[in-house]
Image (cartoon, rainbow, N blue to C red):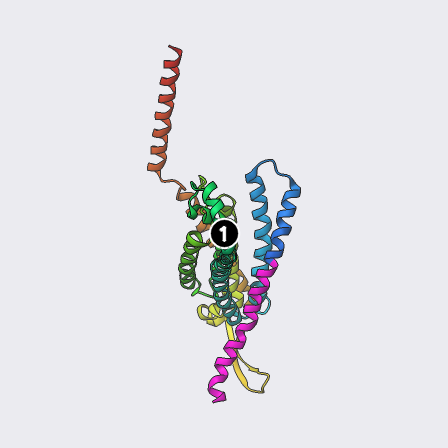
């Protein structure tokens, strides 16, 4: 019985450090949020978008370091792809549960408690409010009492998750599929949060996602290097493609057993390094070529925009001539 459940217990206890890591990340990020806002206020930016960009960079740098440092340590210092895969899977699962709890369920519970506590007071003041505020709808009052929606944290969570997927894709190919499942859960959670928990956010027109686009480009460029290094130095994928560069040796384990292990053959390390960096430069070249060849706006879109601008200019000229006459 103990032997049958030993593997299950080992997996359960193995998730404890991952959950603890996720909780530590949450606590540290909450503490640094106020520090980042205070530092940004001291900078005294002239425009609101400059203030927002500075705050985004500060919070992203800290939270990215907080979320990725353990993964980089496992990937490139311990060189343990299995532990890296387990850590990524655990962080995905724990972070998804944490977001649903902290963003939807717990705020809704506090909202219900506040509403229940204020119910008696509302009854006592109902007559006076009815005389003075007959024109105010009860649903509008409840809408005002809800928490204010903040899109900043949602953007930050998506960018951090994008880093999980791209930076370590070579060690965890299942990450995109797992991300789809987590995003479906997150989508339903955000819909519930916007409809029930938070106030309706005001609409803002914007050309793009701003500084977040630049951050995602940096993550994408960095992921090319990290995945090439994982391919060549951490995982056994290089051994599959280039088996003649490795040899099999006996490795004595801590319990005295002997296992077969593949290690680099003498004089072959230089070829591994050369192949990794050649592959990295090739991927950079291909991505740069795609970036140059595929425009951000299709040709027909640019033509239609030019037509609209021309029509606006013609209308403005006609209006100016009419005013002068």
Residue closest to the far top:
325
Quarter location, residue 14: bottom right
Q: Is residue 85 above or below residue 63?
A: below
Residue at (54%, 39%) from the top-left corner? 49
Please check the rendered image and state whether residue 241 is part of the magenta-colored stretch, yes or no. no
Residue closest to the far bottom:
1
Residue at (64%, 43%) from the top-left corner? 41
| Residue 34 image offset from top left, x and y in percent | 62, 51
Using residue 197 as the reference point, say whether residue 31 is left or right of it: right
Q: Main secondary structure of the magenta part?
A: helix
User: What residue would you read off at disc 1?
Assistant: 122
Q: Of 217 and 203, which appears nearest the observer? A: 203
- Report the span colored magenta: 1-28
* Quadrant location of the C terminus in the rendered image: top left
Residue 74 visible, this angle: yes
Q: Of 225 and 45, which appears nearest the observer? A: 45
């Amino acid at each position: 019985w103990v032997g049958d459940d030993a593997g299950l217990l080992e997996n359960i206890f193995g998730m404890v450090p991952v959950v603890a890591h996720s909780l530590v990340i949450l606590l540290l990020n909450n503490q640094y949020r106020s520090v980042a806002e205070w530092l940004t206020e001291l900078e005294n930016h002239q425009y609101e978008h400059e203030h927002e960009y500075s705050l985004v960079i500060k919070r992203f740098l800290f939270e990215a370091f907080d979320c990725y440092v353990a993964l980089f340590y496992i990937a490139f210092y311990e060189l343990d792809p299995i532990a890296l895969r387990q850590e990524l899977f655990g962080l995905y699962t724990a972070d998804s549960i944490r977001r649903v709890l902290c963003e939807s369920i717990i705020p809704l519970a506090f909202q219900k408690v506040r509403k229940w506590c204020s119910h008696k007071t509302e009854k006592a003041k109902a007559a006076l409010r009815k005389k003075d505020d007959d024109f105010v709808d009860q649903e509008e009052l409840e809408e005002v009492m809800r928490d204010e929606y903040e899109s900043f944290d949602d953007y930050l969570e998506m960018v951090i998750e994008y880093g999980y997927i791209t930076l370590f894709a070579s060690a965890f190919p299942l990450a995109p599929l797992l991300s789809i499942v987590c995003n479906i859960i997150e989508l339903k959670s955000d819909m519930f949060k916007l409809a029930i928990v938070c106030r309706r956010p005001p609409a803002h027109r914007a050309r793009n996602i701003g500084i977040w686009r630049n951050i995602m480009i940096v993550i994408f460029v960095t992921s090319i290097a990290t995945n090439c290094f994982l391919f060549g130095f951490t995982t056994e994928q290089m051994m599959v493609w280039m088996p003649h560069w490795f040899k099999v040796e006996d490795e004595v384990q801590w319990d005295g057993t002997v296992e077969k292990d593949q290690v680099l053959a003498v004089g072959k390390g230089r070829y591994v390094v050369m192949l990794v960096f050649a592959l990295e430069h090739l991927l950079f070249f291909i991505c740069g070529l795609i970036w140059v060849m595929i425009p951000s706006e299709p040709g027909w879109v640019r033509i239609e925009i030019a037509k609209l601008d021309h029509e606006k200019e013609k209308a403005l000229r006609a209006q100016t001539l009419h005013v002068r006459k």
